[in-house]
């Protein structure tokens, strides 16, 4: 998404990314982004909570007014019960993915060379 946003911005079309994975947003270097500290999949608000969803989207859209240079602006939302729900759900899965880190990960050495070159 960040690549697409940078392309649109270079053609004078303003963009705003609303995301909940700060490490991914940071790596993508979007021109304008709002970070909401909700679990992945809940970027636009709590499940079945229309008031929260409206508040999240409303605050995110204010990013068009408040962000004038490439940045990721944190939002004023926390949802610990959402994180607890996701953690409980993941206890009962057979997730064999590598643990997420802030270090770039590549499938092959050629991918690393292409990304870093």
Image (cartoon, rainbow, N blue to C red):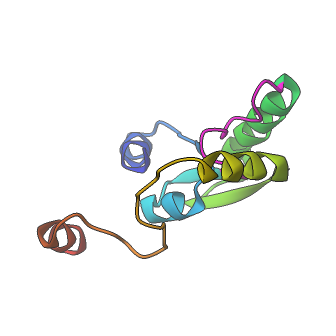
Residue name at image x 53 percent, y 47 percent: 93
Q: Is 31 situated left or right of 52 in this image?
A: left
Q: Is 54 situated left or right of 29 in this image?
A: right
Looking at the picture, tell me which residue is in the foreground, 61 or 65.
61
Residue name at image x 23 percent, y 68 percent: 115
* Horizontal and vertical percent position of residue 65: 72, 44
Q: Is 94 situated left or right of 84 in this image?
A: left
Going by the picture, which residue comes out furthest to the right?
51
Residue name at image x 41 percent, y 65 percent: 98
Q: Quadrant of residue 46?
A: top right
Going by the picture, which residue comes out furthest to the left?
110
Number of marks drawn: 0
Decide whether residue 103 is among the magenta residues. no
* Horizontal and vertical percent position of residue 80: 83, 53
Looking at the picture, tell me which residue is in the foreground, 71 or 115.
115
The quadrant of the image that shows the C terminus is bottom left
* Horizontal and vertical percent position of residue 36: 71, 50
The reply to whether residue 10 is in sight is yes
* Horizontal and vertical percent position of residue 42: 67, 38
Residue name at image x 43 percent, y 49 percent: 2
Magenta: main secondary structure equals loop
Q: Quadrant of residue 97?
A: bottom left
Residue 1 drawn above or below residue 71: above
The quadrant of the image that shows the N terminus is top left
The reply to whether residue 78 is in sight is no
Residue span colored magenta: 35-49
Looking at the picture, tell me which residue is in the foreground, 116 or 70.
116
């Amino acid at each position: 998404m960040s690549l697409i946003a940078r392309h649109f911005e270079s053609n004078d079309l303003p963009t705003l990314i609303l995301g909940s994975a700060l490490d991914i947003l940071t790596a993508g270097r979007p021109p304008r982004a709002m970070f909401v500290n909700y679990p992945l999949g809940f970027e636009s608000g709590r499940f079945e909570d229309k008031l929260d969803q409206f508040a999240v989207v409303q605050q995110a859209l204010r990013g068009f007014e408040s962000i004038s240079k490439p940045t990721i602006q944190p939002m004023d939302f926390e949802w610990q019960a959402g994180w607890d729900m996701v953690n409980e759900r993941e206890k009962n899965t057979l997730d064999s993915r590598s643990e997420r880190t802030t270090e770039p990960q590549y499938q092959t050495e050629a991918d690393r060379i292409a990304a870093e070159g």
